Amino acid sequence: MVKPSKTPSFESAVSELEVIVQEMENSQLPLDQALAAYQRGFVLLRQCQDFLGKAEQSIRLLETTDTEAPSA
């Protein structure tokens, strides 16, 4: 399993999440490790959702600013 870092990038979080899902789907983990992997996956999922939410907010802000700008 990929070693967790404190604040992974979106891409790193997705990659680590993919590894966790693959390991769990293949039943390669004992129960205690599967539980730990699930918990880590949940944290990574939340981080990815936060990244995407912030990106969406930025895009909406840009779109709002663009539509409110006076035309020359």
Image: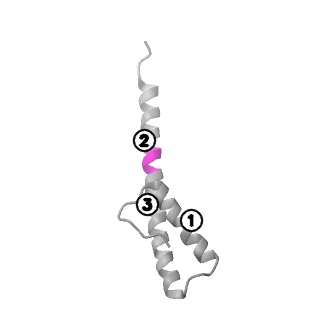
Residue at the outermost top position: 72
How far is the residue under mark 2 from the one under mark 3?
17 Å
Residue at the outermost bottom position: 31
Task: Looking at the picture, tell me which residue is in the foreground, 48 or 27.
Answer: 27
Task: Tell me the magenta residue range.
Answer: 53-57
Tag in front: 1 or 3:
1
Residue lying at 41% horizontally and 23% vertically, measured from the top left = 69
Amino acid type of the residue tagged 1 in the rendering: Glu
The residue that mark 3 highlights is: 47
Measured along the vertical axis of the image, is residue 70 above or below residue 44? above
Amino acid type of the residue tagged 3 in the rendering: Gln
Measured along the vertical axis of the image, is residue 23 above or below residue 55? below
Of the two numbered discs 2 and 3 on the same chain, state the one appearing first in sequence: 3
From the viewer's perspective, tell me whether residue 27 is left or right of residue 52.
Answer: right
x%, y% of residue 44?
A: 46, 65
| Rendering colour mode | one colour
- For label 2, count other residues whose C-alpha is less than 10 Å away and answer few (under 14), some (14-19) or many (20+): few
x%, y% of residue 71?
A: 44, 16
- For label 3, count other residues whose C-alpha is less than 10 Å away and answer few (under 14), some (14-19) or many (20+): some
Q: The residue tagged with tag 2: helix, strand or loop? A: helix
Q: The residue tagged with tag 1: helix, strand or loop? A: helix
Q: Is label 1 in contact with label 3 (beta carbons under 8 Å)?
A: no
How far is the residue under mark 1 from the one under mark 3?
14 Å
x%, y% of residue 11?
A: 49, 55
The residue that mark 1 highlights is: 18
Residue lying at 49% horizontally and 83% vertically, measured from the top left = 33
Task: Looking at the picture, tell me which residue is in the foreground, 5 or 61.
Answer: 5
Residue at the outermost left position: 6
Task: Looking at the picture, tell me which residue is in the foreground, 72 or 35.
Answer: 35
Say which mark, if any, is on residue 58: 2
Overall secondary structure of the magenta stretch? helix
